[in-house]
Amino acid sequence: MSKLGGGNGGGCAICGKPVDQAHRPFCSGRCKTIDLGRWLDGDYRLPSEDAPDEAEIIDLASRVRTED
Ligand SMILES: [Zn+2]
């Protein structure tokens, strides 16, 4: 059995590109952030009828992205 060149069984969970070992199961920090953003986005919508500003979520996501 070969460990290399046999494919990675699906690729990045977000975009499907080959997975980077440093960012598994994603191809990059960006896709990791996108996944996190989705998670936060869902969490953010729970609390109340007072819907958060889209800009607020984008701002949060961009702040996370700068850590990449
Ligand atoms: Zn990706």
Image (cartoon, grey):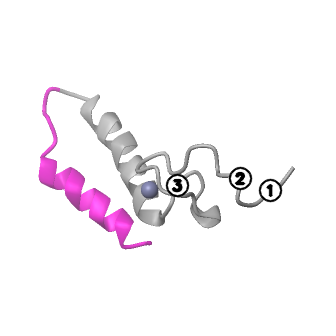
Q: CA distance from mark 3 to mark 2?
A: 18 Å
Contact (CB < 8 A) between labels 1 and 2? yes
Alpha-carbon distance for marks 3 and 1?
Answer: 19 Å
Q: Amino acid at mark 3?
A: Phe
Seen from this angle, which residue lies furthest right?
1
Residue at the spot x=58%, y=63% of the render? 20
* Residue matched to label 2: 6
Q: Position of residue 58 (x, y in %)?
A: 21, 56
Mark 1 belongs to which amino acid? Answer: Lys
Ligand 1 quadrant in view = bottom left
| Count of marks, rendered view | 3
Q: Nearer the viewer, residue 61 or 3?
A: 3
Q: Give the residue type that dot 2 points to.
A: Gly
Please state the extent of the stretch shown in magenta in the rendering. Answer: 49-68
The secondary structure that most of the magenta stretch takes on is helix
From the image, state whether disc 3 or disc 2 is nearer to you: 2
Q: Is mark 3 within 8 Å of ligand 1?
A: yes
57 shown above or below 45: below
Residue 54 drawn at (x, y percent): 14, 48
